[in-house]
Amino acid sequence: MTKGSNFWVIGGEFGSMNFHKLVEGSAQVKGPFKTRKEAEDCWREVSEEHRHQAGVRFSIVEEPNRTAAA
């Protein structure tokens, strides 16, 4: 785990099964979460809510740890 980074759960409904483009207005962003475990818990919950919708997917992404320029 990168110290000080944030985790996000992102996703939504995709227009086709190639999962390249979200259906307009379906995008969801949840977070930030301070730990990957918190993000995984959210991912499980939101994925379970949409498990019967084959075109809906969510992923966990880690925000890069940014440091101030010197």
Image (spheres, grey):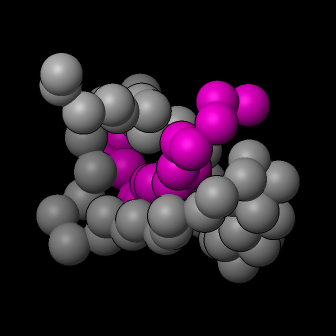
* Farthest-out residue, front: 70
Seen in the image, is 27 located left or right of residue 3? left
Residue at 50 percent of width and 64 percent of height: 32
Q: Position of residue 10 (x, y in %)?
A: 46, 54
Q: Where is residue 60 in the image (x, y as percent from the top left)?
A: 59, 44
Q: How many labels does the image show?
A: 0
Seen in the image, is 37 located left or right of residue 16? right
The residue nearer to you, when weighing 2 against 31, is: 2
The residue nearer to you, when weighing 32 against 27, is: 32
Q: Position of residue 8 (x, y in %)?
A: 51, 54
The residue nearer to you, when weighing 45 against 67, is: 67
Position of the N terminus, as image quadrant, is top right
Seen in the image, is 25 located left or right of residue 6? left
The residue range painted magenta reads: 1-17
Q: Is residue 37 visible?
A: yes
The residue nearer to you, when weighing 16 against 42, is: 42
Residue 65 occupies quadrant: top left
* Residue 20 located within the stretch drawn in magenta: no
* Residue 9 located within the stretch drawn in magenta: yes
Residue 64 occupies quadrant: top left
* Farthest-out residue, top: 70
Q: Where is residue 44 in the image (x, y as percent from the top left)?
A: 79, 62
Q: Can residue 51 be seen in this view?
A: no
Residue at 39 percent of width and 68 percent of height: 28
Seen in the image, is 39 located left or right of residue 30? right
Q: In this picture, is 40 found above or below 28?
A: above
Residue at 31 percent of width and 64 percent of height: 27
Residue at 25 percent of width and 59 percent of height: 23
Position of the C terminus, as image quadrant, is top left
